[in-house]
Image (spheres, coloured by chain):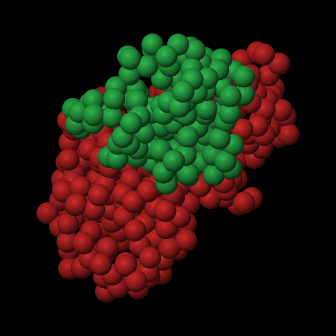
Chain colours: A red, B green
Amino acid sequence: MDGRKTPLYEEHVKLGGKIVNYAGWLLPVQYEGLIPEHEAVRNKAGLFDVSHMGAIRVAGKDAEKFLDYLLTNDISKMKDNQVVYTFMCYPHGGVVDDLLTYKFSNEEYVLIVNAANVDKDYDWIMDKKEGFDVEVENQSDATSILALQGPEAVNILQKLVDIDLPEIKPFYLRRDVKVAGINAMISRTGYTGEDGFEIYVDNEGVLKVWDELLKVGKDFGLKPAGLGARDTLRFEATLPLYGQEISEEINPLEAGLKFFVKLNKEADFIGKEALTKMQEEGLKRKMVGFELKGRGIPREGYEVQKDGKVIGHVTTGYMSPTLKKSIGNALIDVNEAEIGNEVDIMVRNKPVKAVIRDRKFLQNR
Amino acid sequence: MKVMKDLYYTKDHEWIKVEGDLAYVGIADYAQSSLGDIVYVELPEVDDEFEKEEAFGAVESVKAASDVFMPVGGKVVEVNEELIDDPALLNADPYENWMIKIEIADKAELDELMTSEEYEKFLAEEE
């Protein structure tokens, strides 16, 4: 199989990982199995190699001003060492990428972006930076990232650091932390709906950190976890995936993610005008949750129909490992989006009854 | 991968075990192993008729869905209802846990399938 390898590739193979090509990277979709890995993260802890994610550093006198122009969230309100989730939009309101912004100071930030979008994002940022006093550097190739996720994550990582981890609040970061002796940046962030940390290290140090985490994690029920569980976990936690819940064609307002689009922030940002207009005129489509009443599993791309008429499509669907139910997200006609509305999901071209529900899958388990 | 003797196999990794004019149909070890934990099985109705290579049902893991095709044409005479309640049986033993029992329409179609020995070679090439 062709593809790029993270520094941990050989470890994934040794651990029995089933390797797939994801966004050009050879990564494990699972080791022992998607469901046990999913359950480990919900109940104990899981360790993911997410080194495929991109890291783009933006620094300089105008860094804050530039990012407030580039991104939809309010960068000027960020504190040092804070992390915020935000979109980078096109002028028409569609999404270039969704990303985490790490702030070190108002002159230095790092954007953590989707693997599949690194080059597109970098080109976009370079294209927009004219007139701003900023330097932009793609650090993706030199950075390895581990995600330690689950209720036991804090107890496991505590064994390998000499700082008091609870001091790091959710969506904050700490630089220059020694993890098993390796210099790292850690943030209390993740993509699973559980407590946890993301650990950023140089490629040279990542193997040591990975090994030590798995070693000390054993007593806490830690398992290495693959891309398969990463997707079911983020889905259950109502976290969007670029290309499915949001994309160039699906804007953040339609996706129900208005909280991360600060239409009232002072700065003019790319997409602001289009998104403001859409908000004022009313949206035509809405992201909803649904639950199948008949048998079947909804999958991305399946049509949603009402009385034989297509009203939208499934963006993500699963037999939820936590809820043991067939549930999904769908982007549908806003007039059909009321909770309790009965629709048909076209499962392999056959209609299966489903009912529109809220998307708080985990909270209402 | 486990290959059971005295069965016929398809390139899509279905197996068929012939008993006179009747036959059991299921998925091979390779199929269940590629899919991972199977969480859903769709079966046809008794008396449904299918052509050779037509999809008669589906097996799905958390991650993926896969249609299951008829090795030969025929009429469904029995379905293995147990799989509906416990799809993981297909992971546990895909040869013991057949999906449907059929009445074969034309036994000449069996000649186009792979024997156990041929299927083993086919698998070796797939790897």
Q: Which one is nearer the viewer's eye here, B102 or A319?
A: B102
Q: Residue at x 53, y 55 (%)?
A: A233
Q: Which one is nearer the viewer's eye here, A182 or A324?
A: A324
Q: Residue at x 35, y 68 (%)?
A: A186
Q: Is residue A223 left or right of residue A132?
A: right
Quadrant holding the N terminus of chain A:
top left
Instruction: State the image coordinates of residue A296 (x, y, percent, origin top left).
Output: 67, 37
Q: Is residue A130 visible?
A: no
Is A296 above or below relative to A84? above
Q: Residue at x 31, y 86 (%)?
A: A162
Q: Quadrant of residue A47?
A: bottom left
Q: Please give the count of numbered marks on the rendered protein.
A: 0
Quadrant holding the C terminus of chain A:
bottom right
Is A191 above or below relative to A125? below
Is A307 above or below relative to A70? above
Q: Quadrant of residue A305?
A: top right
Instruction: State the image coordinates of residue A120 (x, y, percent, origin top left).
Output: 32, 31
Q: Residue at x 50, y 73 (%)?
A: A44
Instruction: State the image coordinates of residue A285 (x, y, percent, origin top left).
Output: 70, 27
Q: Quadrant of residue A277?
A: top right
User: Most extreme residue toward the front, as rendered?
Assistant: B20
Q: Which one is nearer the viewer's eye here, A364 or A246?
A: A364
Q: Which one is nearer the viewer's eye here, B72 or A271?
A: B72
Instruction: State the image coordinates of residue A265 (x, y, percent, origin top left).
Output: 58, 44
Q: Is residue B5 left or right of residue A179?
A: right
Q: Is residue A37 visible?
A: yes
Q: Is residue A322 left or right of residue A176?
A: right
Q: Is residue A8 left or right of residue A195?
A: left
